[in-house]
Image (spheres, rainbow, N blue to C red):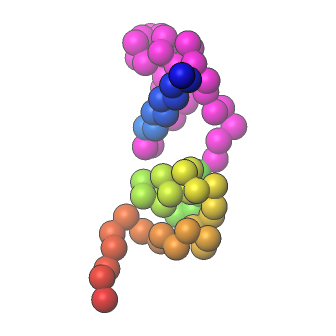
Amino acid sequence: MTQIFIMVFDGLQPSQVTPELMPRLSAFADSGVRFQKHHPVFPTVTRINAASMVTGRYPGGHGLAANTMVMR
């Protein structure tokens, strides 16, 4: 059975994941796949970007517009 592990760091710049600054995370990333040309959607907040990543849709398609939700 194939196992997939997706790790997302909100606000972490790829240039910060170096052997000097983050040796264990850098080694872990080097043993897997990096999405080097990924660009976050706008607005760039956690919940919206996570929803876009798992659905493949822009915010207008999945309906989230902020990290907070108002129930009416």
Q: Quadrant of the N terminus?
A: top right
Which residue is more in the foreground, 65 or 57? 57
The stretch drawn in magenta includes residue 25: yes
Image: magenta residue range = 10-39
Number of numbered discs on residues: 0
Magenta portion: prevailing SS class:
loop
Q: Is residue 8 above or below residue 23?
A: below
Which residue is more in the foreground, 70 or 15? 70
Q: Where does residue 18 sit, x and y in percent of width and height?
A: 50, 16
Residue pictured at 37% horizontal, 64% vertical: 67
Residue pictured at 52% horizontal, 28% vertical: 4
Q: Quadrant of the C terminus?
A: bottom left
Q: Residue at the left extreme?
A: 71
Residue pictured at 48% horizontal, 52% vertical: 50
Which residue is more in the foreground, 10 or 21? 10
Q: Where does residue 5 sit, x and y in percent of width and height?
A: 48, 29
Residue pictured at 42% horizontal, 54% vertical: 46
Q: Residue at the front extreme?
A: 1
Q: Where does residue 17 sit, x and y in percent of width and height?
A: 49, 22
The stretch drawn in magenta includes residue 60: no
Question: Is residue 61 at all visible to an observer of this figure?
Answer: yes
Q: Where does residue 53 sit, x and y in percent of width and height?
A: 56, 50
Q: Quadrant of residue 22?
A: top left
Q: Is residue 46 above or below residue 34?
A: below
In the drawing, does residue 63 fall left or right of residue 69?
right
